[in-house]
Image (spheres, rainbow, N blue to C red):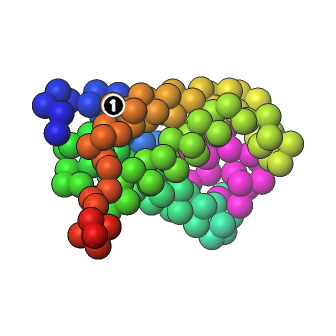
Amino acid sequence: MESRPNLPLIAGALLSVAAATVHAACLTYGAPLYRMLGAGDDMVRMAGRGEMLPAAVSLTLAAGIAAAAVYAFSGAGMLRRLPFARTVLCLVTAVYLFRGIGFGVFVPLFPENPFGFWMWSSAFSLLAGLLHYAGLRRAWADLEPPRSDLLAY
């Protein structure tokens, strides 16, 4: 086990905490926060009318991103090792990197979102993905799944 703190993975986890917090805050502050963060007009209008879709999307994203933060803290050695840590952190890293690099894929799917939203959220995602990648590389050996006794025979 490494004695130095895994700063890239900790920083990636903190970015995930920030992202989860912002998504959760949308549940409280509603349409004005959706608008400030650059959500599309449709999402802002639905939130303003009190429709459930914006809240469901925000809650789902907040929970998923919070889980990513917990796994990153675990991978960094700040929490106990969670099951499937290596696999989950690989998936989290891939999602962040794809979201950061592949924004061109998403823009046509959500044309109502302003271009500024795509730029800042993609930059944030790319940074989080790169930090997760660097931290995952550093923690890779520590995250190796335990060998089963059955495999020893």
- Residue in the foreground of this view, choosing between 124 and 149: 149
Residue 80: give x, y in percent of width and height.
Answer: 19, 54
Q: Which SS type dominates the magenta stretch?
A: helix
Was residue 39 drawn as part of the magenta stretch in this picture?
A: yes
Q: Which residue does the image show at 32% across and 56% down from the upper left?
A: 145
Q: Residues within 10 Å of mark 1 (few under 14, many from 20)?
A: some
Was residue 66 drawn as part of the magenta stretch in this picture?
A: no
- Residue in the foreground of this view, choosing between 50 and 58: 58
Image: 146 above or below 10:
below
Left or right of 126? Residue 14 is left
Left or right of 55? Residue 40 is right
Quarter of the C terminus within the rendering: bottom left
- Residue in the foreground of this view, choosing between 94 and 68: 94
Left or right of 3? Residue 54 is right
Q: Which residue does the image show at 18% across and 33% down from the upper left?
A: 2
Do we see residue 23 in this rendering?
no
Q: Is label 1 in a helix, a strand or a loop?
A: helix
Image: 22 above or below 83:
above
Image: 40 above or below 49:
above
Amino acid type shown at disc 1: Arg
Q: Which residue is mark 1?
A: 138
Residue bounds of the magenta highlight: 25-47
Question: Which of the 4 image quarters holds residue 115?
Answer: top right
